[in-house]
Image (cartoon, grey):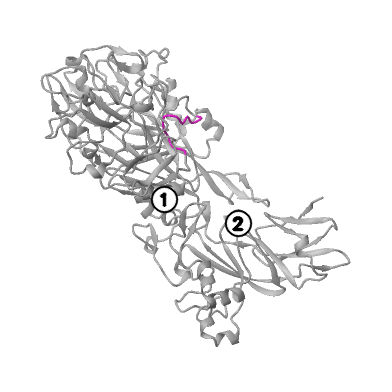
C-alpha cells in the first residue's frame, strides 16, 4: 500500500529560515509538501544523512506563486580554481556581488534565448543574464567542469512558484534567487505594462516603450531582481530513536508589485478615398443604387471592389468594462450594462502602425493567491494581497474622419449622398431582425410591442450587455462575420428582419456583384498592389457582364474573417430620398425602416446609449448581420502564421491545417479554435447569421464551410508581424 504523509508549510515568510521537524510514520512511502514530494525509498539510504533538503516558494503580491524563478546554493570560487584561467574566466565569483568580465554579477539568468516547445517561441524576449545554455555546457569542457562544481545545487520554480533542492550541504549556506519578471509564464510583465502599471520611467526603455534598454549592471534593469539569503541547513534525517526528519524552508518575495495583462491585436481597413457602397449613379433612382459601389472616382468598378484598392489606416479603439462592484452573476444576467465604464487611454497601452493595432490591458477582476497545494484561491478584490486574473468588457473599433476624411458628396439622379464609415462593437451578435435599433423603428418591427423608451427595448439592452471575459496572460485577436447584401431591383417594399424586397443576403456568388454591398474581389483588379493584397477567396462569380468584360471573379464574403476587420464606407441619402422609394441607406448597414421617412438615426449623431452613461450609436453597424468576436490565440499559432508566405490564407478542407510554404509543402495544424461556418460558441445559437458561412459563399447551399479564413492586413499592414516585432509573443 502506497501511503503518504503531508507536511504543511507556512509559505510566504522571507525572514529567517524555518526548520520543519516532523515525526515520520514507519509505513510512509511518500512525503508531500506544497506542490512537491519526496519518495522515502530514494531518500533514506543511510542511517544518518550529511545533507539537507531545501524547499520554498517564490511569491509576489503577498502570496502569488511565481514560476520560472531560478534558485541556487551559492558556492564561492576556491583559491585553487582562481589560479586557473579557464575556470576563473567563466566563474570569477567569490561573493554573489562579484562581477564577470562583462560586468555582470552572479546570476542564474540565461545568456541567450532558448526555444520553449510548450508555447512555441523563444524566451526570454530579451536575455540579460550570463548563464550558459545546456548545449554550451555539454559541448564545452570548462563550462561543464564549472557547472558540475559551482552550479551543482540549482532549481527552477514550478507553476506554483515552488522549488526543492535535495542533497544540500548542511550548515550555513547562501541561497540565491534570480528572476526576470518578463519571463514568468502567465504573470509575465510587458515593457509597456511596466511603464503604465508599475510606474517605471520611459527612459529605461526604447523602441516606443516595447524594449528594455540593455545594461550589464543588473541593478539598472527594471525587469531583473536578484536576492541572497543566508540559511542554516539542517540534516534531512538521522534521529533513529524518534524517527523525525528535518526540512529547511526558505521563501523569497520579489519586490515588484505585479499586474496581470492581456493583449488584443488585429488589422483594420476600409474603402479607398471617395469610394463608398451606395453612390447615386447618374440616370437612375433605383433602390439597388444604394448597394452599388461607385465608379466616379477615376477607377473602374472592378478596381473599387478589389482588395488592392482598400485602405489601411490607424484605427481608434474604445474599451468598455464592468467595474469590480458589478458581480459576475449580475454581468451574466445582463442587467448592469448601465454601470459599465470607459477605460481611460492612460490606463492601458496601445501600439499602432498603418492598419495594425495591439492593445495591452490590465486585469481588474477575480483576484487570486496561491495556496499550499499550488491552486489559485479567489480572495476579495479589496484584499491587499493577490493579483487580478480576469477582465470583462467589450471594444469598439473605428477609423475616424480625421484619419481618413469623409469629405465628399455624390450627386445622382435627383438624389444626393454622403459617406458614412461603419463602427463595430466586439463582440456582438443578434438573432435575425433583433439588432439594436431606433425605438421609433422598434415600434413598427415584428418583434413585439413598443415599450416606450430606448432603455426598455430588449434587444438594445441585450446588445449593450454583450461582452467578453478575458484572462490574464492571454493573447486575443478579432474576427468579423463579413456579411453582404445585394439588390438589383427598383422601388421595392420592406421585408421582415429589416431588409428590403429584392435583397439577397449572404450570397457572395451573386451575379450582380457590383451591387453586392461589402463583397471584396480578390483577383484581376488591375492594380500593381496585386501581390500586396492576397485576400483569401471563398466564392467564384461567373457571367459578370457588368464588370468590363470580366467573366470570372474570385471574391470573399458571407463568411468569417479572422485577424482583420473591414469597415465599409456606405453612402446614405441626405437629400431627395423619396426618389429611391424613401430608403436612406442599404440594409447591409442598418435596419431598413420605410415608415420613418425622416429616419437618419444611425447616419447622424444621436443620444442612444452604447453602455454605461456613454451614448451616440451613429455609424454602428447592425448587430444581427455583422457578428463579431474575440478569438484566443496560441503563441505557437502566431509564430506559424508569421511564417506563412502570403497575407491571406485559409485552412484545408479539414478546417484546421494551414499551408506555411506552398513551395516546400510545409503545413501546420492549428492549435486554436477560430471562427468559421461550423464553429458554434456557447453564446450563439448558430455559427453564422442569415444562413451565412456556407460552402462557395452562397446561402442556397446547405453545407457549412468548415474552412477558416485569415488575413493579416492590407498593403503594408501585417498584424501578426506587428505583435511579433513588439515582443508580445
Residue 657 visible to the viewer: yes
| Residue 482 spot, x, y in % from top left | 34, 31
Helix, strand or loop at label 2? It is loop
Helix, strand or loop at label 1? It is helix
Q: Which residue is mark 2?
A: 158
**As drawn, 219 above or below 661:** below
Main secondary-structure element of the magenta-colored stretch: loop
Extent of the magenta region: 673-682
Was residue 678 drawn as part of the magenta stretch in this picture?
A: yes
| Residue 269 spot, x, y in % from top left | 28, 39
Q: Which residue is mark 1?
A: 639
Residue at x 73%, y 71% (from the top left corner): 51
Was residue 273 drawn as part of the magenta stretch in this picture?
A: no
**As drawn, 445 above or below 105:** above
Residue at x 76%, y 67% (from the top left corner): 236
Which is nearer the eye, 712 or 172?
712
Q: Residues within 10 Å of mark 2 (few under 14, many from 20)?
A: some
| Residue 727 spot, x, y in % from top left | 40, 55
Residue at x 30%, y 43% (from the top left corner): 713
Q: Residues within 10 Å of mark 1 (few under 14, many from 20)?
A: some
- Please state which of the two labelled residues, at mark 1 or mark 2, is closer to the viewer: 1
| Residue 322 spot, x, y in % from top left | 48, 37
Amino acid at each position: 500500500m502506497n501511503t503518504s504523509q503531508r507536511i504543511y508549510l507556512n509559505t510566504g515568510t522571507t525572514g529567517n529560515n524555518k526548520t520543519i521537524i516532523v515525526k515520520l510514520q514507519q509505513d510512509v512511502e511518500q512525503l508531500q509538501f506544497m506542490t512537491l514530494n519526496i519518495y522515502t525509498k530514494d531518500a533514506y539510504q543511510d542511517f544518518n544523512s550529511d545533507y539537507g533538503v531545501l524547499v520554498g516558494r517564490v511569491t509576489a503580491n503577498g502570496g502569488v506563486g511565481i514560476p520560472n524563478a531560478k534558485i541556487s546554493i551559492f558556492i564561492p570560487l576556491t583559491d585553487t580554481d582562481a589560479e586557473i584561467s579557464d575556470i576563473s574566466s567563466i566563474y570569477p565569483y567569490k561573493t554573489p556581488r562579484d562581477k564577470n568580465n562583462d560586468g555582470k554579477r552572479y546570476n542564474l539568468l540565461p545568456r541567450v534565448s532558448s526555444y520553449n516547445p510548450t508555447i512555441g517561441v523563444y524566451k526570454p524576449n530579451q536575455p540579460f543574464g550570463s548563464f550558459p545554455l545546456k548545449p554550451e555546457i555539454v559541448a564545452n569542457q570548462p563550462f561543464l567542469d564549472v557547472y558540475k562544481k559551482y552550479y551543482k545545487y540549482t532549481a527552477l520554480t514550478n507553476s506554483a512558484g515552488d522549488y526543492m533542492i535535495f542533497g544540500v550541504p548542511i550548515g550555513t549556506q547562501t541561497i540565491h534567487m534570480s528572476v526576470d519578471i518578463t519571463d514568468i509564464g502567465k504573470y509575465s510583465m510587458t515593457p509597456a505594462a511596466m511603464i503604465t502599471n508599475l510606474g517605471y520611467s520611459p527612459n529605461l526603455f526604447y523602441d516606443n516603450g516595447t524594449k528594455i534598454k540593455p545594461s550589464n549592471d543588473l541593478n539598472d534593469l527594471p525587469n531583473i531582481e536578484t536576492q541572497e539569503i543566508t540559511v542554516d541547513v539542517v540534516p534531512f534525517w538521522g534521529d533513529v530513536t524518534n524517527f523525525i526528519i528535518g526540512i529547511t524552508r526558505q521563501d523569497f518575495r520579489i519586490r515588484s508589485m505585479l499586474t496581470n495583462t492581456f493583449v488584443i491585436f488585429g488589422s483594420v481597413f476600409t474603402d479607398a478615398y471617395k469610394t463608398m457602397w451606395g453612390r447615386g449613379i447618374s440616370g437612375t433612382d433605383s433602390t439597388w443604387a444604394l448597394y452599388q459601389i461607385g465608379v466616379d472616382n477615376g477607377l473602374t468598378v472592378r478596381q473599387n471592389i478589389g482588395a488592392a484598392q482598400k485602405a489601411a489606416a490607424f484605427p481608434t479603439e474604445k474599451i468598455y468594462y464592468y467595474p469590480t462592484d458589478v458581480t459576475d452573476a449580475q454581468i451574466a444576467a445582463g442587467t448592469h450594462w448601465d454601470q459599465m465604464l470607459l477605460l481611460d487611454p492612460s490606463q492601458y497601452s496601445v501600439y499602432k502602425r498603418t492598419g495594425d493595432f495591439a492593445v495591452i490591458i490590465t486585469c481588474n477582476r477575480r483576484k487570486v493567491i496561491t495556496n499550499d497545494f499550488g491552486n489559485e484561491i479567489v480572495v476579495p478584490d479589496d484584499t491587499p494581497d493577490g493579483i487580478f486574473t480576469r477582465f470583462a468588457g467589450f471594444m469598439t473599433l473605428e477609423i475616424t474622419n480625421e484619419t481618413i476624411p469623409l469629405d465628399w458628396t455624390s450627386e445622382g439622379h435627383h438624389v444626393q449622398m454622403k459617406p458614412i464609415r461603419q463602427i463595430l462593437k466586439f463582440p456582438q451578435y443578434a438573432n435575425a431582425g433583433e439588432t439594436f435599433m431606433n425605438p421609433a423603428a422598434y415600434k413598427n418591427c415584428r418583434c413585439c410591442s413598443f415599450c416606450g423608451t430606448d432603455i426598455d427595448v430588449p434587444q438594445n439592452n441585450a446588445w449593450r450587455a454583450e461582452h467578453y471575459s478575458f484572462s490574464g496572460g492571454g493573447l486575443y485577436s478579432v474576427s468579423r462575420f463579413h456579411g453582404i447584401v445585394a439588390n438589383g431591383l427598383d422601388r421595392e417594399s420592406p421585408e421582415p428582419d429589416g431588409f428590403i424586397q429584392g435583397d439577397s443576403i449572404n450570397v457572395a456568388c451573386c451575379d450582380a456583384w457590383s451591387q453586392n454591398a461589402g463583397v471584396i474581389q480578390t483577383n484581376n483588379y488591375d492594380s500593381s498592389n496585386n501581390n500586396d493584397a492576397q485576400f483569401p477567396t471563398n466564392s467564384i462569380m461567373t457571367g459578370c457582364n457588368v464588370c468590363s468584360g470580366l467573366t470570372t471573379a474570385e471574391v470573399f464574403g458571407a463568411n468569417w474573417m479572422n485577424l482583420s476587420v473591414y469597415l465599409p464606407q456606405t453612402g446614405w441619402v441626405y437629400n431627395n430620398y423619396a426618389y429611391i422609394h424613401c430608403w436612406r441607406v442599404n440594409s447591409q448597414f442598418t435596419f431598413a425602416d420605410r415608415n420613418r421617412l425622416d429616419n437618419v438615426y444611425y447616419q447622424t449623431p444621436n443620444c442612444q446609449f452604447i453602455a454605461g452613461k456613454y451614448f451616440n450609436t451613429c455609424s454602428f453597424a447592425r448587430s444581427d448581420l455583422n457578428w463579431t468576436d474575440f478569438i484566443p490565440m496560441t503563441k505557437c499559432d502566431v509564430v506559424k502564421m508569421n511564417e506563412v508566405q502570403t497575407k491571406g490564407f485559409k485552412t484545408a478542407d479539414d478546417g484546421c491545417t494551414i499551408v506555411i510554404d506552398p513551395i516546400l509543402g510545409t503545413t501546420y495544424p492549428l492549435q486554436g479554435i477560430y471562427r468559421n461556418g461550423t464553429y458554434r460558441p456557447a453564446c450563439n445559437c448558430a455559427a453564422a447569421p442569415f444562413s451565412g458561412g456556407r460552402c462557395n459563399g452562397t446561402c442556397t447551399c446547405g453545407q457549412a464551410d468548415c474552412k477558416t479564413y485569415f488575413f493579416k492586413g492590407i498593403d503594408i499592414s501585417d498584424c501578426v508581424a506587428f505583435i511579433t516585432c513588439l515582443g508580445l509573443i
